[in-house]
Amino acid sequence: RRALANLFEVIGEEEYVSDEDLLDASTALSGSGPAYFLMTMEALIDSGVHMGLSRDLATRLVQQTMYGTAIHVAESDKHPAVLRNDITSPGGTTSYALYMAERGGLRTTLSDSIWAAYRRSRELGEKDSEIGPVLNR
């Protein structure tokens, strides 16, 4: 256990989940989580490039935005929704962007993706995976 903890401390703080029933959910959320963030970063970087920024500059801007946001959330006692509302001006660029993200189903797509990872983790552990929100499976 200690060797695994040392390995995981390289990428973040260790969280021990003692309830075996929660391991698949933890895997879906945190084990697969870096891939969700990396894909989001890819999309942001590519959008910056499409708008004319160099890939290098777009990458640095996105890296610093993700890093700064992660630190802000970690140091705050506020829920992420409150922090997001704090930086969203009515009628501003962020509110327009968030409207389009919601309209495009970003939140639902992320949730469905995490449920898919959860089901797959259960399948790999030879457990019942026909659980959660009903999708066109």
Image: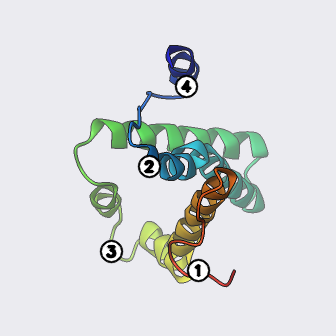
In terms of secondary structure, where does tag 1 sit? loop
Q: Identify the residue shown where x is 58% and y is 64%.
A: 128
Q: Quick one: SS at disc 2?
A: helix
Which is nearer the N-term, disc 2 or disc 1? 2
Q: Callout 4, which amino acid?
A: Phe
Q: CA distance from mark 4 to mark 1?
A: 34 Å
Dot in front, 3 or 4: 4
- Any mark on residue 8, and which? 4
Query: In the rendered structure, are the residues bearing label 3 and label 1 in contact, judged by CB atoms less than 8 Å apart?
Result: no
Asked whether 121 or 69 is in front, the reply is 121
The reply, left or right, for residue 90 in relation to residue 36 is: left
Mark found first going from the N terminus, 2 or 3? 2
Amino acid carrying mark 1 in the image: Gly
Can you identify the residue that label 1 sits on? 104
What residue is shown with label 3? 90
**For the residues marked 2 and 3, what is the alpha-carbon distance in whole angstroms?**
39 Å
Q: Which mark is residue 22?
A: 2
The kind of residue tagged 3 is Pro
Q: Nearer the viewer, mark 2 or mark 4?
A: 2
Residues packed near mark 2 inside 10 Å, few (<14), some (14 to 19) or many (20 plus): few
Callout in the foreground (3, 1):
1
Query: Distance of mark 3 from mark 4, alpha carbons?
Result: 40 Å
The residues bearing labels 2 and 4 have C-alpha atoms spaced at a distance of: 18 Å
Give the color scheme: rainbow, by chain, secondary structure or one colour.
rainbow
Cα–Cα gap, marks 2 and 1: 30 Å
Please report whichever mark, 2 or 4, sits nearer to the chain's N-terminal start: 4
Point 54% across, 38% down: residue: 64
- Residue density around tag 1, few if under 14, some if 14–19, many if 20 or more, within 10 Å: few
